[in-house]
Image (tube, rainbow, N blue to C red):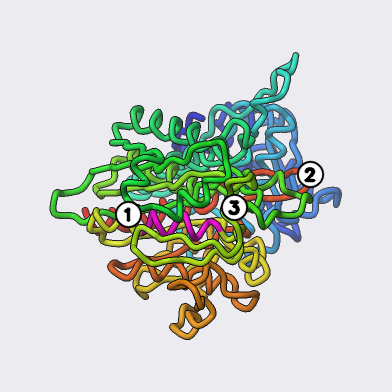
Amino acid sequence: MEIAIHSLKPSADNHDCIVIGVYEQGILSPAATLVDVASAGVIQSFLATGDFTGQCGETQILYKLSGLATPRVMVLGLGTHGKLSDSKFRKAIQGASKALRQAQIVEASFYLLDTPVARRSPAALSKILVQTVMDSDYQFDHHKEPSEKPRRSLTQLHIHVSGGAEEEAAIRRACTEAQATARAVAWAKDLANEPGNICTPIWLAEQAEAMAQRTGIKSTILGPDAMEALGMRLLLGVAQGSRQEPRLIILEYWGGSDEQAPIVFVGKGLTFDAGGISLKPADKMDEMKYDMCGGASALAAIQAAAELKLPLNIITVVPASENLPDGQATKPGDIHKSMKGLTVEIINTDAEGRLILADALTYVERFEPDVVIDMATLTGACIIALGHQTAAVLGNNEDLVHDLIRAGKESMDRAWELPLYEEYQEQLKSPFADLSNVGGRPAGTITAASFLSRFTENYHWAHLDIAGVAWKSGENKGATGRPVSLLVEYLLHRAHHAA
């Protein structure tokens, strides 16, 4: 999608459609007022009919208004005047995007940066606008028969500014960042939406290598023999029930100084999780292709960093495997030795994500990281605790946890902290091994993170449990691309301070 920044007045705008905002009770935004004046009061007359309430996200397209160069004006509801939050602003943009898509408009101008939103600058609003429009245009139809009449989609997005040169420069930077983030989110969705018969560990590694070659990132792929030599018996134990070989994907982006310790992302890459011998219920098992959303997000975040040429050193590590129940699969009660040397009693083979992450989190010590952030669709308990709106974040470093929460708020890809007290380790005790891979039903998200913490004692670490936010179920099921936006926002913040 091509994005352009202008200071053109709406009356002179000749693009296919211009979008202006109107609040409830018939209150016009500044741009809507200009359109109303240029069209001799058409907007006010339209509102006077009572057909348009101004509710957030409501839309109506008006055609060929006198006094305007554009053939279409979209009136967009912004809700109650003075109460437009960033979430409602995004909802309004989603409504406009849907209407533009239905009308098959290919070029649109948005006059919405003049709408005040609490604690959001025009640059921040432009970032929300661009990411929302690009995300709304996403569709995954790779395996469908092509339509005889291809859908026309938005190819040109024009954003209009009213401030000075400094504000315009900030908006341009924000739009560049938003485009890279939106492309990364879309790629993460594409990876996750592929079915398990296509997205295998080997296929995922191939996609990562192709991206690395395209963006100039160093890539290394390890197979079972290398994992065996490293002592990664937890990762190999999860994979041994599958005919698909596991892979350890390592990507390295060196955009910072030689003295700068790297930021490391570790993403869970279970390309399909049937639960192993602890077999999952059949209902919605198809959605277990999404158990690699953490890995997809980690790959997408480093792609965005490379595209933006951030002055940082970043490493992404993705342990990729399947978890299936054949005759060689790990059995409940089996004991495997981790790369770290700790032995683990496998009480439930469906608690496999923490196992492959444990070996990967041990592996990344060799990079002497500044921080390590892992992301995983790890526990159903996280959905019970935080629903489908918010990811959980836990860690051993308060500053890192708070930085991720801040990045989540800024990117509207939110996370919330759960405790990681020492007392939770009691639930992981095993009479036969150094620890068990599950701690019972109470505090399931916390005990899973407690398990991971045993393998992260030598560096600053945070864990994002994205089980509730990585995909949506139902008729419109699909990957969300979360927490890519959070991760990129965290990197942008770090890059700003590194510059």
Residue type at mark 3: give it.
Answer: Ala
Residue position for label 3: 470
Q: Where 298 sits versus 406, above or below? A: above
Q: Is residue 371 left or right of residue 450?
A: left
How far across and down, in percent of the image, does residue 320 sit?
48, 44
Which residue sits at x=35%, y=66%? 456
- Look at the magenta stretch and give its main secondary structure: helix
Residue type at mark 1: give it.
Answer: Tyr
| Residue projecting furthest to the top | 148
Neighbourhood count class around disc 2 (C-alpha, 10 Å): few under 14, some 14–19, many 20 upward: few
Neighbourhood count class around disc 1 (C-alpha, 10 Å): few under 14, some 14–19, many 20 upward: some
Q: Is residue 258 left or right of residue 219?
A: left
Q: Please tell me the numbered disc located at residue 363.
A: 1
Residue type at mark 2: give it.
Answer: Glu
Give the extent of the magenta segment: 352-361
Q: Where 427 sits versus 207, above or below? A: below
